[in-house]
Image (spheres, rainbow, N blue to C red):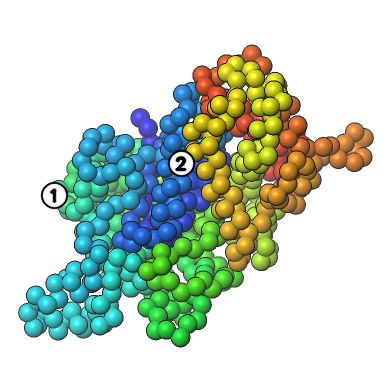
Amino acid sequence: MPAKLYIFAIGGTGSRVLKSLTMLMASGIEMNEVTEVVPIILDPHKDNKDVQRTEVLINKYRQIRASLKSDLVKGDFFYTPIKTLEDIVRKSDGIGTTPMLTLKDSHKTFKDYIDFEGLNDANKALASLLFSKENLDTEMDIGFVGNPNIGSVVLNQFAESDEFKNFASNFTPNDRIFIISSIFGGTGAAGFPLILKNIRGADKNPKLTNTEYLKNAKIGALTVMPYFGIKPTDDKKVVDKSTFISKTKAALQYYARGVNKDLNRMYYIGDLVNLDYEYDPGKDGQQNNAHFVELASALAIVDFANAMDTDLETENGKPKLPVYKEFGIREDDEILNLKSLSVSTQQVLSLPLSQLVLFSLYLDNRLGSAIDSRIPWIVENPPIDRSFSRGNFVEIYLNEFNQLFKEWLDEMKNNRRAFDAYLTDTNDDLSGVIKGYSPKKGVLGFGTSTVDFKTIDEANNSIVKGKNYPTPADKLIKVMSEGTRKVLSEKFPDLFQNIKK
């Protein structure tokens, strides 16, 4: 039975980590203990550009995968399916086709949401004691802007939502759950404990089914501590970076007392080296550039997806072997590349991400001329021709996904701390494409062997011999997956030696 990994991505940070995970999944990164991923985005800010960009990216991924006729194998690009709740439920019940969970009345101010004016005097006084005037006047359509006390009230509707009920009714004992949240904002800090409480305490909700499965579910979570700041401004700010550390400390103390013990695996990440972003509480769309911390955070999900079932056993709602992990780098450098990462991280990340970079460069700089030159692997059955390269699969799905991938790499390269691992402005010479690595020495140890697009074509030519593929799309994905791996293993042995065979 397929083991689904349900990912609850809370707030802007949750969506950005989910975006990085989607890039890793496109690279074919191994997630051995799950067969499909079901993301659920929880954010009241519907105009959040980070959420929108992630939704677009996931939609492109799903379009690419839906176009393929043959079964992908481990290591192929886009190997792991991404599903929505509608795919799982398989009926029209108003859930929709996006991973976004609908929150009711999030367009109101918090004062209107709790019907402050309808309260009696005693309850008004209590509400005024618990919530400041700024809290009460907060417009929630831009999120909870650093106020988890507001978020914890509004997000309580999560347990009553149709999405949560359908999630529960389709949950199996094989499935897993992962929760992504930041700890220094509003939406993530409020949503994480609440979601965990409602899953572990599902047997207390009479409207849910499969409550025993949820109570003993395999649950991992990622807590993202501060990794960016907010630029100073003369305006009165609802979000103030000077409060990030104090909020983080308070939340960590709360988690240690009442949250961590309910998790099979807890992952922590943050960074003191950071960049101040323009202050935007949400009205202008809230779009942050991709960050290495989000890539490392996505690797936490990969680690959880690769954990054995026996390491995630839970009995009567309590994990038997809870594990707590942090992410580290080798040196405290402000500009990172693959060699900056631990060997264990390189073993997971270096090969698939480097393969996707080579594929990206091939799409941009070589596919058209390879078609015109009738390279053998291109013309073998079925042929990849100009009509195919101008069709929806390449032009709308693959190329647009590739554009988002390149933007993701560029944004990480230009952020702080920077992740600058690849030279992506090359036209043909691929020898220096992986920063910190050079192709192996030539004959008798002198010089270097040439690595260019011809090298990839030669690898692909050897792969297609004697094989048939159902469609040109299948051939392009499967041959490039295998061909880029072959090139990296033969031409960059120093990179490949850290890869688990």
**Is residue 362 or residue 133 the one in the foreground?**
362
At horizontal 67% and vertical 62% (from top left) the residue drawn is 335
Give the residue at mark 1: 206
Q: Nearer the viewer, mark 2 or mark 1?
A: 2
**Could you say where residue 306 lies in the image, as x and y percent from the top left?**
49, 42
Look at the numbered disc 2 and give the secondary structure of its residue.
helix
Please, which residue is most extreme toward the top here?
Answer: 466
Q: Position of residue 313 (x, y in %)?
A: 37, 45
First reached walking from the N terminus: tag 2 or tag 1? 2
- Quarter of the image with the C terminus is top right
Q: Amino acid at mark 2?
A: Lys
Q: Could you say whether the residue bearing mark 1 is in a helix, strand or loop? A: loop
For this rendering, which residue is in front, 104 or 167?
104
Taking the image as drawn, is residue 284 in sight?
A: yes
Q: Quadrant of residue 322?
A: bottom left
Residue at 36% across / 60% down in the picture? Answer: 47
From the image, tell me which residue sits under label 2.
Answer: 60
